[in-house]
Image: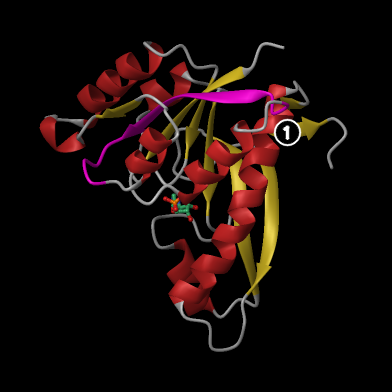
């Protein structure tokens, strides 16, 4: 079986990366991680990748005069590892339209809210501030507009009375760690199609 090759892009802790590393450790899992790329030199996810024997790269956005040059450089680094799918896993840089279009339907992102609610970098704080009783996480194909694109999987997560951001984040992350490998498996098995900017999924479990 040829495995789907993943490039995982991170900016920090990399707990979603860790969930993918764990899934890929199963010989039956239909994907493998070819590269972990971080835009932050101190992202602790890089250690998780190195420990698992995965190739890592750091491309610091601070070294580039504009977004297009940074995007072009990460595109070059990613392509050198021949991935089939680019997985954003806590990658906290907006990617420009050229990059996003170049990876059309081969670029996915995890977001800590039930999109299209609570887009942006403060999704969990915004959900708490709005007083919602249920929030969650969304795995989606990436389009040029921030936190948009065909939804592959979502999990609802309850907000408990008195939750602070750390407590709610931890609960959402648990759900993320379950849906990310599940969605990658569905894509690797060819069960996800995008039709009219919505996904159709064969045999969703
Ligand atoms: C995750 O909760 C992910 O949903 C969020 O960053 C966290 C990364 O955690 N992403 C975004 O907010 C993107 N807009 P991790 O580094 O432990 O995987």
In the image, 110 versus 26, the foreground residue is: 26
**What is the quadrant of the N terminus in the image?**
top right
Which colouring convention does the figure follow?
secondary structure
Location of residue 130 with respect to 95 vertically, above or below: below
* Ligand 1 contact, mark 1 (Cβ < 8 Å): no
The answer, for residue 159, to whether it is visible in the render is yes
> In this rendering, is residue 139 above or below 59?
below
Q: Is residue 78 magenta?
A: no
Q: At x 65% / y 77%, what residue is drawn?
A: 133
Determine the secondary structure under disc 1: strand
User: Along the horizontal axis of the image, is 202 left or right of 51?
Assistant: right
Single out the residue that lies furthest toward the bottom.
162
Q: Which residues are magenta?
A: 28-42
Residue 74 relative to residue 144: left or right:
left
Residue depicted at x 39% and y 56%: 121
Q: Quadrant of the C terminus?
A: top right
Q: Position of residue 73 (x, y in %)?
A: 25, 20
Nearest the viewer among 176 and 136 is 176
Task: Say which quarter of the image contains residue 61.
Answer: top left
Task: Give the image location of residue 126, x and y in percent.
Answer: 46, 70
Rendered residue at 42%/27% (across/down)? 54
From where the camera sits, is residue 151 visible?
no
- Picture coordinates of residue 18, whole percent (x, y): 50, 44
Q: Residue furthest right?
A: 203
Q: Judge the density around disc 1: few (<14), some (14-19), many (≥20) Cα neighbours within 10 Å.
A: some
Q: Residue at x 49, y 17 (%)?
A: 83
Q: Quadrant for residue 106, please give it.
A: top right
Q: Nearer the viewer, residue 15 or 71?
A: 15
Quickly name the residue at label 1. Answer: 199
């Amino acid at each position: 079986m040829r495995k789907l090759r993943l490039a995982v892009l991170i900016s920090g802790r990399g707990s979603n990366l860790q969930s993918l590393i764990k899934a890929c450790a199963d010989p039956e899992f239909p994907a493998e991680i070819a590269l972990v790329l971080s835009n932050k030199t101190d992202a602790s996810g890089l250690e998780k990748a190195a420990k698992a024997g995965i190739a890592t790269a750091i491309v610091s956005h601070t070294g580039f005069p504009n977004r297009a040059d940074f995007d072009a450089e990460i595109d070059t680094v990613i392509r050198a590892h021949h991935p089939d799918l680019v997985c954003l896993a806590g990658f906290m840089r907006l990617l420009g339209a050229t990059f996003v279009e170049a990876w059309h339907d081969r670029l996915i992102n995890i977001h800590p809210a039930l999109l299209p609610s609570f887009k942006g970098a403060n999704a969990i704080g915004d959900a708490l501030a709005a007083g919602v009783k249920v929030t969650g996480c969304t795995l989606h194909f990436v389009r040029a507009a921030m936190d948009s694109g065909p939804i592959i999987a979502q999990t609802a997560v309850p907000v408990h009375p008195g939750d602070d951001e750390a407590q709610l984040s931890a609960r959402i992350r648990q759900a993320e760690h379950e849906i990310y490998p599940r969605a990658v498996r569905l894509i690797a098995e060819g069960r996800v199609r995008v039709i009219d900017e919505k996904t159709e999924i064969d045999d969703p479990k």
